Image: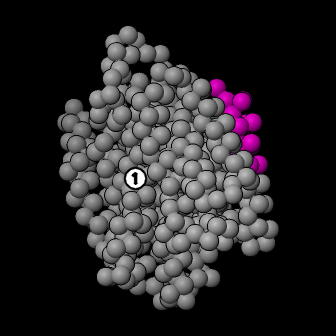
C-alpha cells in the first residue's frame, strides 16, 4: 500500500506565500527608487542617496539577528504581527518625511521591520512544509519573493514616471495592509520548548544568534548574495554604458520567468535525489550567466544571461535555504532561517560597497568576469563545506 503524499498547498502555505509576495513587492519597489527620491526631494549626494537605499538592508540584517534568537521564546505569532505593524508604521512615515536624516531613520526602521516579519514568515512556513517535501515547498515559497523581484522594480519605475513618489508610498501602504489583513486568517505553529531548551537559549553567546549547523551552507549563500549584488546595484549603469537600457527593463522579468519554470522541478529533485545534483550544475550555470553578462553586446544576449542567472542563482537560493533547515534541529528552525538570511542579506548589502572600488580598476565587464570566477570557486568551497558530507550520506544509505 502506497504511503499518502503529505499535502503542500494548504491554506496557511498559500497565505504566508501571499503575504511574503506583497512584502517583497514593497521592499523592491522602494529599493529601486529611494536613491532617486533622495536626490530629487532632498538634493542628496550620490553616496547619501545610495545610503538611503542600502540602510534598509542594514536594518534588516541587525534585526534578523535578534529575531532568530528570540522568536521561539516570544512566540512566532507575536513576532509576526509586531513586525507587520512596525512595517506599516514605517510605510506611513514616508508621507511626513521633511529631511534626509529622517529619511535615513525611517529606512533603517523599515528594514528592521522587514527583517522581523520576513524571518517570522519564513520560520512559520518551514514548519508548515512537510519534511518529505521541504525542497519542493521551499522552492514554491521562494517564488513569491521572485515574483516580487520581477514586479516591484518595474512597478516602481512606472509609478515614479507617471504618478510621482506620493502615489508610490500609497501603493506600498496598500500592499502592507493587504499583508496584515490576510495574516489574520493564518494559523502559525508554535514551538513548545522544554526547560533544557529554554536554558540553552539564555545568554549572549555567539551560538545564541546563529545556528551552527546552518552556517556552512549559509556561507555559500553569502558569497552568492555578494555576487548577485553586482547585478542588482550596477545593471542599470552598465546597460546605460553599453546602450542596452531598454532591454535591461526586461532583465528581471526574464530572470523571474525562468525561476518560475525551474522551481517545481528543482525542489522535487532536491527532495528525491539530494542537494549535490542541484547545487553543482546551478553554480556552473550561474558562472556562465555572469560570464555571458560580461560580454553582452546585443539585447538577446543580455536576456539570455538573465535566463541563465535565474536558473543558476535562483535555484541556489531556494535549495540552500532548504538545506539550512534540514541540517538544523526542529526547535531552532527560526535561528537557522535567520542565520541563512543574515548571510544572504549581508552579502547583498556589502557587495555594492566593495565592488564600487573594483569597477574603476576593472570596469563593469571585468567586474562581472571577476564575479564569475568567485562563483566558480564556490564549487570547491561548497564541496568542502557541504557537498562531500552529502555524498558520504548517499554512499552510506546505498551501502545499507
Instruction: Give the residue displayed 47% in from the left and 63% down from the top.
Output: 311
Location of residue 250 by image quarter: bottom right
Left or right of 169 in this view: 101: left
Q: Closer to the camera, 354 or 47?
A: 47
- Look at the image and tell me whether residue 258 can be seen: no
In the rendered image, the vertical position of residue 358 relative to residue 188, given as above or below: below
Q: Could you tell me residue 75's position as x and y percent?
A: 54, 23
Q: Residues within 10 Å of mark 1 (few under 14, many from 20)?
A: many
Magenta run includes residue 176: yes
Quickly name the residue at label 1: 346
Which region of the structure is painted magenta? 173-188
Quadrant where the C terminus is found in the figure: top left
Q: Secondary structure at mark 1?
A: helix
Q: How is the image coloured?
A: one colour
Instruction: Give the residue displayed 74% in from the left and 53% down from the top.
Output: 95
Q: Closer to the camera, 76 or 90?
A: 90
Q: Could you tell me residue 88's position as x and y percent?
A: 69, 42
Q: Could you tell me residue 31's position as x and y percent?
A: 58, 60
What secondary structure characterizes most of the magenta part?
A: helix
Amino acid at each position: 500500500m502506497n504511503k499518502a503524499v503529505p499535502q503542500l498547498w494548504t491554506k496557511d502555505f498559500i497565505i504566508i506565500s501571499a503575504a511574503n509576495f506583497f512584502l517583497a513587492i514593497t521592499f523592491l519597489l522602494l529599493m529601486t527608487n529611494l536613491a532617486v527620491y533622495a536626490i530629487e526631494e532632498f538634493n542628496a549626494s550620490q553616496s547619501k542617496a545610495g545610503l538611503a537605499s542600502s540602510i534598509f538592508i542594514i536594518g534588516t540584517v541587525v534585526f534578523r539577528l535578534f529575531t532568530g534568537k528570540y522568536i521561539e521564546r516570544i512566540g512566532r505569532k507575536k513576532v509576526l504581527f509586531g513586525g507587520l505593524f512596525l512595517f506599516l508604521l514605517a510605510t506611513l512615515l514616508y508621507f511626513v518625511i521633511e529631511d534626509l536624516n529622517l529619511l535615513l531613520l525611517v529606512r533603517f526602521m523599515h528594514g528592521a521591520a522587514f527583517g522581523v516579519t520576513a524571518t517570522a514568515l519564513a520560520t512559520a512556513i518551514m514548519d508548515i512544509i512537510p519534511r518529505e517535501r521541504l525542497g519542493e515547498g521551499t522552492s514554491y515559497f521562494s517564488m513569491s519573493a521572485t515574483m516580487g523581484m520581477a514586479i516591484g522594480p518595474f512597478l516602481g519605475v512606472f509609478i515614479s514616471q507617471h504618478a510621482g513618489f506620493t502615489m508610490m508610498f500609497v501603493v506600498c501602504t496598500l500592499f502592507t495592509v493587504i499583508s496584515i489583513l490576510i495574516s489574520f486568517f493564518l494559523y502559525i505553529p508554535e514551538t513548545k520548548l522544554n526547560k533544557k531548551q529554554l536554558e540553552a537559549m539564555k545568554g549572549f553567546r555567539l551560538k545564541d544568534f546563529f545556528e551552527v549547523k546552518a552556517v556552512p551552507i549559509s556561507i555559500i549563500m553569502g558569497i552568492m548574495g555578494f555576487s548577485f549584488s553586482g547585478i542588482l546595484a550596477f545593471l542599470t549603469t552598465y546597460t546605460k554604458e553599453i546602450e542596452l537600457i531598454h532591454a535591461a527593463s526586461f532583465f528581471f522579468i526574464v530572470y523571474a520567468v525562468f525561476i518560475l519554470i525551474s522551481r517545481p522541478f528543482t525542489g522535487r529533485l532536491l527532495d528525491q535525489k539530494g542537494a549535490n545534483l542541484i547545487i553543482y550544475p546551478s553554480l556552473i550555470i550561474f558562472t556562465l550567466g555572469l560570464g555571458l553578462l560580461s560580454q553582452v553586446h546585443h539585447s538577446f544576449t543580455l536576456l539570455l544571461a538573465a535566463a541563465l542567472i535565474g536558473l543558476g542563482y535562483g535555484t541556489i537560493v531556494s535549495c540552500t535555504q532548504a538545506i539550512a533547515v534540514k541540517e538544523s534541529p526542529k526547535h531552532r528552525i527560526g535561528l537557522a532561517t535567520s542565520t541563512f538570511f543574515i548571510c544572504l542579506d549581508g552579502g547583498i548589502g556589502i557587495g555594492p560597497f566593495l565592488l564600487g572600488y573594483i569597477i574603476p580598476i576593472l570596469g563593469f565587464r571585468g567586474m562581472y568576469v571577476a564575479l564569475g570566477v568567485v562563483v566558480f570557486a564556490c564549487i570547491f568551497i561548497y564541496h568542502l563545506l557541504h557537498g562531500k558530507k552529502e555524498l558520504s550520506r548517499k554512499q552510506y544509505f546505498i551501502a545499507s
